């Protein structure tokens, strides 16, 4: 059977721009006054049959003045293949200099992923399901660990995250199946807060690299918030992804909108394909819904936004 395994992790599109930094790195766990619940869904390439779709639920919050925990559940469907998994995370936050708002955070995650291939609709090219060839559905489980670090200085941030640190140790079912499942993420940005203005402007860059084959992508993001008060704001932004190995060829551009009203949050994005997929189907929809709860302010500035 000619098949290759997926990356065994939650696919990252632009969910992280929609107030979901924790989706990228455990080191963000617990930062902020409240526990954050975020539900996210991505439907890719509208109009293409059996196009991929991804759903995730994440929750994170602080458990002490300098510690946070979190949990992410995800489901990813891509044609006949699927991934389901859970990620349990812990973060510890340090103060380097309170006066200058200089902080350093470390995160560690345990990751469990179930990868499967559904062969019930496979055929031999003539519309016949050959049970002798496709005898059973294929499934494998993988346990692994992620490590992350977050550096903050006032309104600047930089995070690095290494996913799937441990090489895979399973019986191969195809020669092309990668043993190195490692992914490397870098995420950095700065929030401009003009004096006397109720607007915030946040440019950011996200880089991801798949260590098994060297593929890499870079996201350029721009986000503008209109602040009403401490708990209410509106925002709009744009996200663009490039493929690094093809001279930064653009893959998609995604306008984004969102709002936060008291403890409720919502964000929406429409990814407009500008690569070869644009001739087969329209873009991808991303929706994020959220709720903040159990709010209390930590005595340590390292836990505050």
Image (spheres, rainbow, N blue to C red):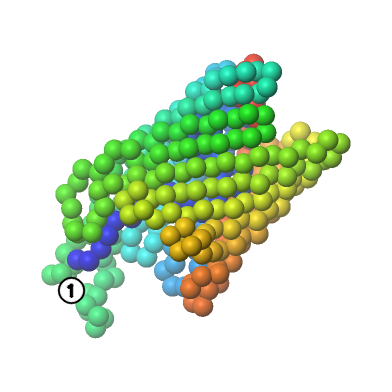
Residue 131 lies left or right of residue 301; in this view the side is: left
Q: Position of residue 165 (x, y in %)?
A: 33, 38
Q: Residue at x 53, y 32 (%)?
A: 150
- The reply to whether residue 152 is in sight is yes
Residue position marked by numbered label 1 in the rendering = 130
Q: Quadrant of the C terminus?
A: top right
The part of the image, by quadrant, that contains residue 282 is: bottom right
Q: Residue at x 58, y 58 (%)?
A: 240
Q: Quadrant of the N terminus?
A: bottom left
Q: Position of residue 154 (x, y in %)?
A: 67, 29
- Taking depth in this image into account, of 166 and 139 the one nearest to the observer is 166
- The reply to whether residue 55 is in sight is no
Residue 37 lies left or right of residue 90; in this view the side is: right
The residue positioned farthest toward the bottom in the image shown: 126
Q: Position of residue 63 (x, y in %)?
A: 53, 22
Q: 209 above or below 167?
A: below
């Amino acid at each position: 059977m000619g098949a290759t395994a997926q990356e065994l992790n939650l696919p990252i599109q632009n969910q992280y721009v929609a107030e979901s930094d924790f989706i990228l790195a455990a080191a963000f766990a617990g930062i902020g006054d409240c526990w954050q619940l975020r539900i996210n869904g991505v439907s890719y390439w509208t109009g293409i049959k059996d196009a991929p779709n991804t759903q995730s639920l994440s929750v994170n919050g602080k458990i002490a003045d300098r510690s946070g925990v979190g949990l992410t559940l995800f489901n990813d469907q891509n044609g006949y293949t699927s991934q389901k998994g859970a990620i349990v995370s812990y973060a510890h936050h340090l103060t380097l200099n309170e006066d200058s708002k200089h902080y350093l955070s470390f995160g560690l995650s345990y990751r469990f992923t179930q990868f499967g291939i559904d062969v019930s609709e496979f055929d031999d090219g003539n519309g016949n399901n050959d049970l002798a060839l496709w005898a059973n559905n294929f499934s494998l489980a993988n346990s692994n660990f992620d490590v992350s670090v977050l550096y903050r200085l006032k309104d600047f941030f930089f995070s690095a995250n290494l996913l799937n640190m441990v090489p895979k140790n399973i019986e191969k079912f195809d020669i092309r199946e990668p043993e190195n499942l490692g992914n490397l993420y870098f995420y950095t940005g700065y929030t401009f807060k003009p004096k006397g203005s109720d607007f915030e402007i946040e440019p950011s860059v996200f880089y991801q690299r798949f260590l098994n084959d060297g593929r890499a992508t870079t996201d350029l993001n721009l986000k503008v918030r209109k602040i009403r008060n401490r708990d209410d704001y509106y925002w709009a932004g744009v996200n663009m992804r490039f493929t690094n190995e093809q001279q930064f060829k653009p893959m998609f551009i995604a306008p984004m909108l969102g709002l936060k009203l008291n403890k409720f949050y919502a964000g929406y994005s429409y990814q407009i394909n500008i690569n070869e997929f644009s001739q087969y189907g329209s873009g991808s929809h991303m929706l994020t819904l959220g709720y903040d709860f159990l709010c209390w302010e930590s005595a340590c500035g390292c836990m505050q936004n």
